[in-house]
Amino acid sequence: MKILLVIPPSPFLIDEKSLPHLGILSIATLLKTKKNHSVNVLDLSGIENYTDAFSYILENNTFDIIGFTSSTPQYPHVNQLLKLIPAGVKKIIGGPHITSCFSPKHTNSRIEKNISDITTKFDTAFVGDSEISILKYIDEELFNERVLNADTDSKLFLTNNTINDYPWADRTLIDIDSYHFYIDGSLCTSIISQLGCPFNCSFCCGRSSNSLRKIRTKSVDNVVREIEHLYKTFGFQAFMFYDDELNVSKSVNVLLKELIDFQKKFNVKFKFRGFVKSELFTDEQAYLMKQCGFNWLLSGFEAASDRILVNINKKSTKKDNENVVKLCKKNGIKIKALMSCGHPGETKESVLDIKSWVIDNKVDDLDVTIITPYPGSPYYDLSTHVEGDTWKYTVSSTGDSLYSENINYSDISNFYKGIQGSYKSYVHTDHITAEDLVKYRDIVEYDSKAALNISYNVGNPTVKLQFTPDEIHSILK
């Protein structure tokens, strides 16, 4: 069976070739190693004329199954590619957008519309973990199944007992040399040591999804061996952990100590980056992370107002967030503050509070975004229709509200942050308009970066944007 798995482009990002997509590489690796199927991965990241590239490959190859991964802002680009697939080819899709759209425990008109859009365009949708699902789909020829849902079928759901049974993502299935994310000058690749986040931040998608909420942690030995493999095979000495929050795992300190010992054994110094949850962050974690090589940490502080943090259901306070900054500075770790605005009850003052907070706390880098209610997030799923395209979410404890403009996620992707000057707000509150959210977000970022002497990320100009036939080997592996 000939299978093509497609990584769609992400033109809304500053740099599409920063870090590779590991989920679909894991599926491709699994199919090749477990079943010895003919599997190609088509990586359209950074390809401006991606429909031309896709057409060329379809004209010169035949496939039985074409599968896509998709985040929500990638979905419109997947829809452009779908139009080019010839009849008779099975079209399948998985990824965070699919899982989030199917995750709500209830329904309303726009939830139903998102699900219908997926099931009418694709032969099969893979919801949640897809490792077990894809093998079952092919082995049992479940080609007429509209949905394989690991969130509702426990036999398809990865557990702590099974998560280590699957091979590491094979990075040779893409042109790994074309990726260029660096940590303090060292070429970096991504790694995932755990799945799921148990928290229920109101802006975050998939909060009703078992696959996105339940923590499944790889063994410390498995993670260390994968890092050893990446170091010895590709020469990587820098790694970005894509776990939602590293310190949610109870084994994080054990992992850090093992990585410290590994580096001593092989006389090498690694560099790491990762995310931490502020109210769980401790002095011991900070110390071990610094000793391990975490020169950078990132934390979703989100807001500089305790009321907004309550409205987000963040479970942390300004004091918790300030403690993270203090512990990082104490241990010589740089901290990137991930901030957002456009939450229920947001005001001009609460947005500008972000500027004061990041400057006063002297963070080392920051990212300021305007939130969008994604499918699968409480902001989206628990909103009620007001009129026209407007929906309203209200925080029960404070009475603060958020209004969002309904977005056609099949066609529109410019709701997603990424490129300076291209922000658009699809949300507003009783106190601030969508236009003013954009205005004050820009002021916060510009003034804060100027005050803290933080440069803008302008991406890497070496990314190839135009596909030509002689580059087939680099995008189709």
Image: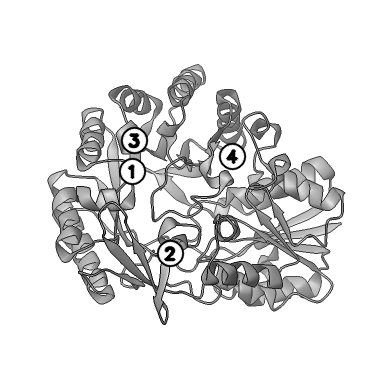
Residue 126 is at least partly visible in this image: yes
Q: CA distance from mark 1 to mark 4?
A: 29 Å
Residue 37 percent location from the top left of the image: 83, 50
Question: Helix, strand, or loop for circle 3?
Answer: strand
Q: CA distance from mark 2 to mark 4?
A: 23 Å
* Amino acid type, mark 3: Asn
Please report whichever mark, 1 or 4, sits nearer to the chain's N-terminal start: 4
For image coordinates 21% across by 70% down, the residue present is: 432
Position of residue 276 in the picture relative to residue 346 (left or right): right
Query: What label does residue 295 carry, if any?
Result: 3
**Which residue lies under the disc numbered 1?**
299
Q: CA distance from mark 1 to mark 3?
A: 14 Å
Q: CA distance from mark 3 to mark 4?
A: 22 Å
Residue 216 vertical placement versus 18 (above, below): above
* Amino acid type, mark 4: Phe
Give the label, 1 or 3, closer to the camera.
1
Residue 445 percent location from the top left of the image: 23, 61
Position of residue 314 in the picture relative to residue 351 (left or right): right
Please report whichever mark, 2 or 3, sits nearer to the chain's N-terminal start: 3
Please report whichever mark, 3 or 4, sits nearer to the chain's N-terminal start: 4
Q: Are marks 1 and 2 in contact (CB under 8 Å)?
A: no
Question: Helix, strand, or loop for circle 4?
Answer: helix
**Which residue lies under the disc numbered 4?**
234
Residue 53 vertical placement versus 144 (above, below): below
For image coordinates 55% across by 25% down, the residue present is: 220
Question: Helix, strand, or loop for circle 1?
Answer: strand
For image coordinates 44% across by 74% down, the residue present is: 406
Q: CA distance from mark 1 to mark 2?
A: 28 Å
Snapshot quadrant of residue 228: top right
